[in-house]
Every structure is written in structure tokens, then in C-alpha cells.
């Protein structure tokens, strides 16, 4: 009874019937399904667990559900413009959103003295929580084609998101300017996706004799980069609207955090 890729169990009845017939019968494939919804709830339980950490024990921290809710509302029903066979992008978006929410809630722990060290802390945290969410969604189908597609695109999205946040903080020059930050993040994400995808396109061009139009490279890659930015955008908007999460974003960007004003003793004796 070998377990095949895609969470399928192939069952073959075997009996030595001699001259009466074949020894092995026809294989019967059984599709494994997840027992209940518990694995699907795991990422949400993880976010609840992060909200119990000491820095997050306040009402403002629970606003993290707003960007999460926006992203997951989008992924529940595939939009009409999504090409056939690319619905797995919705799983990538949902998994990346969980990872971003976790990073926002852990930013106090992830910020380091040097920007590179902050990036090296953000990257595994974002990867770990995003992969956990993706694995919970895919279940036992981890070796299926769709799971491999999700894994590849999610890996690039994780790397691009972490690197874009780090470089955007450098470009901001220790100042938090929301509109400029949004623009730079989009440009950086598009640049990272183009750089990462370029070698694969060049290989395809060489193998096809240069018969692939450049539009078939730029348009899909820029569309994926836009989806990556759209996943990040609700968290950026929350950070602009909420002082609590604004400091969290500043920690991820390694820009100067706000400090409470120091009251002068002069004149306090009056």
C-alpha cells in the first residue's frame, strides 16, 4: 500500500490464485483528507498566542486582525481576473499575510542594533510562520504540484518582502514618511521579483530560440509583485493609522523610534 505524492494511498489486493487469475488486482487510490478543521485553525491560534506576549497585552495589538481580515476576505473568493490554473496564488497570499502579522507582533524582538541583523531576524520569522500557514492549508498534499508551486512563489515572496522592508528603511534615512515608504516598497518589490525571475526567463528564451515576447515576462512578474505589495499594504495602512503599530513598523525598518519628551525641571518649582 504505497503512499503516493499528493496525499494519496494506493491499495492493491494481492492473492496467489494460481492459474485462476492474476496475483495482483487493480489498484484503488484513496485520497487522504485532513481530520476536521483543526490544522486550518493552527495559524490563527498561533496569532492568538503571539497576542499573549507581554508587549502585545493591550487593546491596540488586536487591531492586527483588521489587515488579516482584509487579506483573507480577498482570498475566499477567487477574483474574475485571476487566470485559470493560478488559484494557488491565493494560498500564497494567505500564508504570507499570516507571516507578516506574526512579524508585526514580534517586531520588538526582531529589531537589532544593525539593519543587517534585523533583516536576518525578520527573514526566518517571516519564513517560519508563512510556511506553517501554507503547510496547514495544503495538509498531506505537500508533494503535489500545487504545493510545489505555492512553496516556490511563497519563498520568493518571503525573501522579497523581508529585503524590501530592510532596504526601504535604509532609503527612508531614519525618517518615517508613509507615502514615500509605500512607493519605495512597491518599486523594491517589483525590482526583486524581476531580478529573481530574469534567469528563468533567459533560460526559456535560449531554449526556445528567442521566440518568447518580453511582454510574457514583464506583465506576469509585475502582476505577482503587485499582489505581493497588495498583501503588505493593509499592514502598512494599519501602521500609518495606529501609533502602536507605527512603532512596530519603525522597528522593522530600523528607523528612529519615538521617545517620550523629557520634562525639564526648570520652572517646575513654581
Image: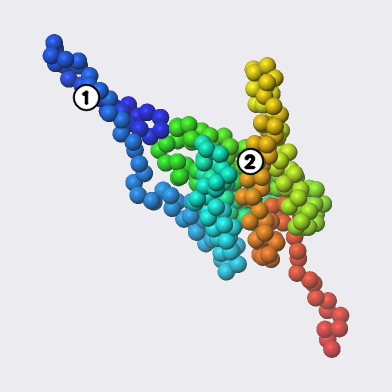
Residue in front for this viewpoint, 184 or 112: 184
Colour mode of the rendering: rainbow
Q: Is residue 162 visible?
A: no
**Label 2 neighbourhood size at 10 Å, few (<14), some (14-19), many (20+)?**
some
Percent coordinates x, y for residue 247 in the rendering: 70, 61
Residue 209 in the figure: left or right of residue 180: left
Residue in front for this viewpoint, 256 or 185: 185
Q: Residue furthest bottom?
A: 270
In the picture of the structure, the residue carrying the numbered disc 2 is 224
Where, quadrant-wise, is the N terminus in this rendering?
top left
Residue 246 vs 144, above or below: the answer is below
Indicate the secondary structure of the residue bearing disc 2: helix
**Label 1 neighbourhood size at 10 Å, few (<14), some (14-19), many (20+)?**
few
Residue in front for this viewpoint, 262 or 185: 185
Q: Quadrant of residue 14?
A: top left
Residues at marks 1 and 2 touching, judged by CB atoms closer than 8 Å = no
Indicate the secondary structure of the residue bearing disc 1: loop
Disc count in the image?
Answer: 2
Residue 153 in the figure: left or right of residue 195: left
Q: Quadrant of residue 53?
A: bottom right
Instruction: Give the residue at x 60% y 67%.
Output: 60
Residue 267 vs 18, above or below: the answer is below
Instruction: Give the residue at x 80% y 72%.
Output: 262
Instruction: Give the residue at x 68% y 36%.
Output: 219
Where, quadrant-wise, is the C terminus in this rendering?
bottom right
What label sits on residue 99 in the rendered view?
A: none
Instruction: Give the residue at x 34% y 38%.
Output: 32
In the picture of the structure, the residue carrying the numbered disc 1 is 13
Percent coordinates x, y for residue 93 in the rendering: 56, 46
Percent coordinates x, y for residue 237 in the rendering: 67, 59
Disc nearer the start of the sequence (1/2): 1
Q: CA distance from mark 1 to mark 2?
A: 47 Å
Amino acid at each position: 500500500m504505497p503512499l503516493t505524492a499528493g496525499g494519496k494511498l494506493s491499495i492493491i489486493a494481492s492473492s496467489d490464485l494460481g492459474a485462476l487469475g492474476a496475483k495482483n488486482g487493480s489498484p484503488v487510490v484513496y485520497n487522504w483528507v485532513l481530520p476536521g478543521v483543526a490544522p486550518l485553525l493552527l495559524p490563527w491560534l498561533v496569532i492568538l498566542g503571539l497576542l499573549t506576549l507581554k508587549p502585545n497585552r493591550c487593546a491596540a495589538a488586536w487591531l492586527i486582525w483588521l489587515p488579516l481580515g482584509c487579506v483573507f476576505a480577498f482570498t475566499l473568493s477567487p477574483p474574475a481576473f485571476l487566470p485559470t490554473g493560478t488559484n494557488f496564488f491565493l494560498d500564497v497570499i494567505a500564508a504570507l499575510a499570516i507571516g507578516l502579522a506574526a512579524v508585526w507582533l514580534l517586531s520588538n524582538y526582531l529589531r537589532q542594533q544593525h539593519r543587517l541583523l534585523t533583516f536576518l531576524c525578520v527573514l526566518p520569522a517571516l519564513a517560519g510562520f508563512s510556511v506553517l500557514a501554507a503547510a496547514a492549508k495544503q495538509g498531506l498534499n505537500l508533494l503535489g504540484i500545487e504545493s510545489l508551486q505555492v512553496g516556490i512563489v511563497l519563498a520568493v515572496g518571503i525573501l522579497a518582502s523581508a529585503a524590501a522592508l530592510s532596504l526601504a528603511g535604509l532609503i527612508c534615512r531614519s525618517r518615517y514618511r508613509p507615502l514615500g515608504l509605500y512607493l519605495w516598497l512597491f518599486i523594491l518589490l517589483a525590482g526583486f521579483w524581476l531580478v529573481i525571475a530574469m534567469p528563468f526567463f533567459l533560460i526559456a528564451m535560449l531554449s526556445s530560440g528567442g521566440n518568447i515576447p518580453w511582454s510574457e515576462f514583464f506583465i506576469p512578474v509585475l502582476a505577482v509583485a503587485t499582489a505581493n505589495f497588495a498583501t503588505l499594504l493593509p499592514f502598512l495602512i494599519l501602521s500609518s493609522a495606529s501609533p502602536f503599530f507605527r512603532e512596530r513598523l519603525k522597528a522593522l525598518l530600523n528607523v528612529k523610534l519615538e521617545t517620550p519628551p523629557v520634562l525639564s525641571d526648570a520652572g517646575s518649582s513654581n
